[in-house]
Image (cartoon, grey):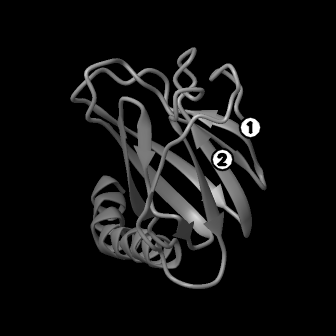
């Protein structure tokens, strides 16, 4: 009896493993990879593409400045997401699902948005185009949305 059970397990095992591997491969193939978009922060500006495509997007946020920064984003379907604080010379990734429309990005460190650390990105038809943002159009820097 014991040998029969062992033989059954040895026969069934390759089939179970093959089905599991096929399921994992199918799932990986059907889930599109997130688009990666570089965002650079430094005193007192944010550089990011001005237009992006809709879909799952990983914002790779690099702090190239001398001060600690962070990145917040809001827009259609994204109430407000944040990277948290990013030390100088460090990076963090923030993954969001973008829909057609306009998104606002800003540094929530008090005073930074007011000094120009904010950007507007349009999501929709067309390809991504590079750009940067700056300026000082008011606000406390903690809730530019």
Q: In the rendered view, would you say 36 is above or below 125?
A: above
Q: Residue at x 64, y 83 (%)?
A: 125
Q: In the rendered view, would you say 145 is above or below 85?
A: below
The reply to whether the C-beta atoms of the residues labelled 2 and 1 are less than 8 Å apart is yes
Quarter of image, res 130: bottom left
Q: Residue at x 74, y 50 (%)?
A: 75
The residue at the far top in this view is: 110
Q: Residue at x 41, y 59 (%)?
A: 37
Residue 56: give x, y in percent of width and height.
56, 62
Q: Secondary structure at mark 1?
A: loop
Q: In the rendered view, would you say 113 is above or below 31?
A: above
Q: Residue at x 36, y 59 (%)?
A: 5
Residue 33: give x, y in percent of width and height.
44, 68
Q: Secondary structure at mark 2?
A: strand
Instruction: Tell me which numbered mark, 2 or 1, is placed earlier along the sequence.
Output: 2
Quarter of image, res 91: top left
Q: In the rendered view, would you say 34 is above or below 76?
A: below
Residue 43: give x, y in percent of width and height.
36, 29
Determine which residue is flagged by label 2.
104
Residue 126: give x, y in percent of width and height.
57, 85
Determine which residue is flagged by label 1.
145
* Neighbour tally class for label 2: few under 14, some 14-19, many 20 plus, Cα within 10 Å: some
* Neighbour tally class for label 1: few under 14, some 14-19, many 20 plus, Cα within 10 Å: some
| Quarter of the image where the N terminus is located | bottom left
In front of the other: 78 or 137: 137
């Amino acid at each position: 009896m014991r040998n029969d059970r062992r033989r059954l397990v040895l026969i069934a095992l390759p089939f179970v493993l093959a089905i599991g591997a096929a399921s994992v491969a199918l799932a990986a193939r059907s889930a599109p990879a997130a688009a990666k978009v570089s965002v650079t922060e430094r005193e007192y500006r944010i550089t990011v593409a001005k237009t992006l495509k809709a879909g799952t997007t990983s914002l790779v946020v690099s702090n190239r400045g001398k001060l600690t920064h962070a990145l917040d984003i809001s827009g259609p379907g994204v109430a407000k997401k944040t990277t948290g604080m990013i030390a100088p010379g460090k990076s963090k990734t923030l993954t969001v699902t973008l829909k057609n429309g306009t998104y606002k990005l800003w540094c929530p460190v008090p005073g930074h948005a007011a000094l120009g650390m904010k950007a507007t990105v349009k999501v929709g038809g067309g390809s991504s185009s590079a750009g940067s943002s700056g300026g000082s159009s008011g606000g406390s820097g903690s809730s530019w949305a």
